[in-house]
Image (cartoon, rainbow, N blue to C red):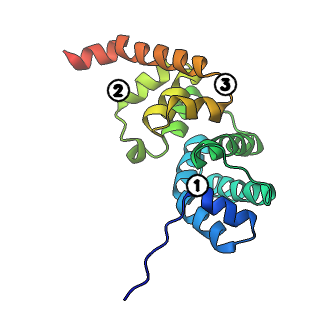
Amino acid sequence: MAPATDIQTDQQLVESLNSGSEDAFTELYERYQPWIMSLAYRFTGHHDDALDVLQETFAYIVRKVPNLQLSAKMTTFLYPAVRNLSIAANTKRRRSVSSESLVDIYCGEPSDCNTSDDFRELLLQLSSDHREILLMRFVDEMTQPEIAASLDIPLGTVKSRLHHAVASVKDSPIVKQLME
């Protein structure tokens, strides 16, 4: 008879990690490594930088132990760390990024975002704040409260930005042309 698999919640893993469990760290790493890599690549646009961000994100987690508190979803907790570490990686690289390159960074590989030229153009028409909120909501599938917590902004600001981003997309000549 095979042993039952014990799938722990993130909260249970954090508690085990705080107690010194290396297995809990390994489980968290395996669970969130693909998401962190994807997000870091979206922000940095470079595989090597994304790997550095991945490593730094887990170093950040280790520095929080044994007092790590998880009061939200793990992705909500990790998003600001990945974002800030990615910004630092971009600064370290000291490269200037055009608006078009920013869309490439936000979407990652074209196959990851499944974007067409029209969609890329549409994203370029949005402000960076609106673009980020839109991608967090519809690509990362984060809820509005999770976005607010991740960006450390009021929920009303998230709702407003999301509303204006969606309205801009709906009113875009590109969308109107596609709907004809």
Is label 3 in a helix, a strand or a loop? loop
Furthest-bottom residue in this view: 1
The answer for how far apart the CA atoms under marks 2 and 3 are is: 30 Å
- Residue 170 position within the rendered picture, expressed as x and y whole percent measured from the top left: 35, 15
Viewer-closest of 137 and 18: 18
Q: Earlier in the sequence, mark 2 or mark 3?
A: 2
* Residue type marked 1: His
Q: Residue furthest left?
A: 180
* Front residue (pair 162, 73): 73
Of mark 1 and mark 3, the one earlier in the sequence is 1
Residue 11: % across, % down: 61, 55
The secondary element bearing badge 1 is classed as helix
Question: Cα distance, mark 2 to mark 1?
Answer: 25 Å
Q: Residue at x 60, y 63 (%)?
A: 29
- Determine if residue 91 is in view: yes
> Which disc is residue 47 wearing?
1
Residue at the spot x=63%, y=57% of the render? 48
Quarter of image, res 152: top right
* Quadrant (top left, top right, bottom left, bottom right) of the N terminus: bottom left
Please report the residue visible at 22 percent of the width from the left and 18 percent of the height from the top: 179
Left or right, 67 with reference to 97: right
Kind of residue at badge 2: Asp
Position of 79 with respect to 2 (left or right) is right
In terms of secondary structure, where does tag 2 sit? helix
Image spot of residue 156 (x, y percent): 58, 17
In the image, is residue 160 above or below residue 116? above
- Residue bearing the label numbered 2: 118
| Above or below, comparing residue 5 to residue 83 in the picture | below
Q: Quadrant of the C terminus?
A: top left
Q: Which residue is mark 3?
A: 153
